[in-house]
Image: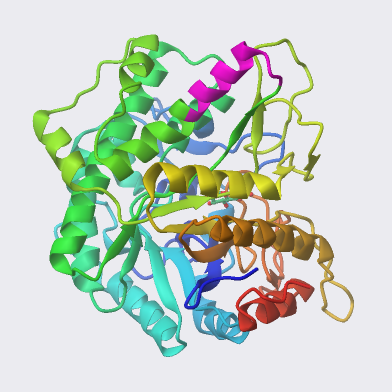
Amino acid sequence: MGFPKGFYWGGAVSAHQSEGAWNEGGRGPALRDFMTTDKKTRKRYLTYIDKDGNKCFLKYDEGETLPQGAHFEVFDECYYPDHQAVDFYHHFKEDIAMFKEMGFSILRTSISWSRLFPNGDDQQPNMEGVCYYHQLFEELKNNGIEPLVTLWHDDTPASLEERFGGWKNRKLIEFYGRYAEFCFREFKGQVRYWLTFNEVNNVLMFLDMFGGQPSDDKYQEAYQELHYKFVSSARAVVKAHEIDPNNVVGCMICGVPFYPATCDPKDIMLNFHTWEKGIFYSSDVMCRGKYPAFSKRLWAEHNVVLDCTQQDLVDISKGCVDMYTFSYYMTSAVTTHVNNDKVSGNFAAGVRNEYLSYSEWGWANDPMGLRYFLEMMYSRYELPMMIVENGLGAVDKLEQDKSVHDSYRIDYLRNHLKEMALAIENGVNLIGYTTWGCIDVVSAGSGEMKKRYGFIYVDKNDDGSGSLKRYRKDSFYWYKKVIATNGADLD
Ligand code: BG6
């Protein structure tokens, strides 16, 4: 059992869940800055003022959009966890030193678009933001860590949402294009691994999983948003290669493998179609450069008419990604039968799978599902693969002596690594692994701090209190050994 020589070991965070400093250094607000925190079983809301001056809450995860004439607003009575997050902005040197101590050779993070372009479409960049990322990438380089940079991690500049309706508007292709090109030029030589959109397929998959019974209009919006993102991504890939042939660009797919809950042929067909819609639709466009044949059926199911030009299709055909990059946490089971044993939790859906155990947040623990996804996607696309998110969100206890005994996290990661090694043995060209939230960050789904993933504990609580001090968990020392032995010693 083994991992190839030069395999990238590391961790992943996103700007909005780690940086904080939401209104420092000339940064403009992003959508996420208006997102409140809530209980694990409830959705998070965006706060805004409507055209008549009323305070309102928007259910973003359910596809609600900002009404005409409204603007986002911070309410004194609400808590916004991303405002400070874990203050990576001011702690990055200390944090990178700890990543180096573990032996990381790669760190995935994202650039906050509104830190570079406060309104998203500014003619001139915010130089303080540019300078911050230069320092960050330099620090990584000095510590022998390769940056893997996501250009968009669910944090569209708020101004673009308010003025243009965000990704519902074709203009976003142009604005994202300018932002992406700027990044490729500015950080040339510092960054060569890029991801265009985090979990791009979520727009559609989440609508099915959590949207109740969405109307055709909601599907129209979701497919349209995805199309604009596909075009943006493809154009970015072309630009990235043009600016620096060393650039390697990946898609970023939320990798949820689906299982049929029974072997009733109806369940098998439903399962296959769920794969098509949730996974293959996005992956095929980004890896093969064209819409798959089944797209016509998907669009027809909801009377979708895409705003799609000939040029869009040409761009998509030219901008195929260089690697298949994805996140993996859990599997989900689907059925056509009446089954009330549903999974619930943040971002968890489908029916309960009796062969699996579930985390406190309802996420199925299924290491073999990771191997299933790796092998399935490799045989479909034969592109180099990287797992850029994987991990266990759990409640950790900081002991009196500041240790954290997270054996459950070690077990989770060990079992997933074993399956990765088997996939490699089966021929999958897996080149790297970045565990999610290598340092504790704000949960995207629930906004909590107590849903922790890190090897490094951050003293920060759900209500925003805490010293922000960092402490090594047991998993820190375990991962260090795993990396030092290139995955040979998983004990
Ligand atoms: C992925 C996102 O969906 O899952 C991350 O890309 C997110 O941003 C991660 O944090 C884990 O989800 P959660 O809800 O536990 O933070």
The x, y position of residue 122, in whole percent, is: 19, 55
Question: Residue 464, located in which quarter of the rendered image?
Answer: bottom right
The residue located at (61%, 71%) in the rendering is 2
Per the rendered image, the range of residues in magenta is 262-275
Q: Quadrant of residue 185?
A: bottom left
- Of the pair 178 and 477, the residue shown nearer to us: 477
Compared to residue 98, the image places residue 218 above or below, namely: above
Left or right relative to 13: residue 298 = left
Locate residue 129, reporting x and y percent.
Answer: 32, 70
Residue at (24% x, 34% y) in the render: 290
Q: Is residue 156 visible?
A: yes
Q: Residue furthest right?
A: 400
Q: Quadrant of the C terminus?
A: bottom right
Q: Position of residue 115 (x, y in %)?
A: 34, 63
Residue 262 in the image: above or below residue 469: above
Front-most of residues 381 and 146:
381
Tell which residue pokes out farthest to the front in this image: 426
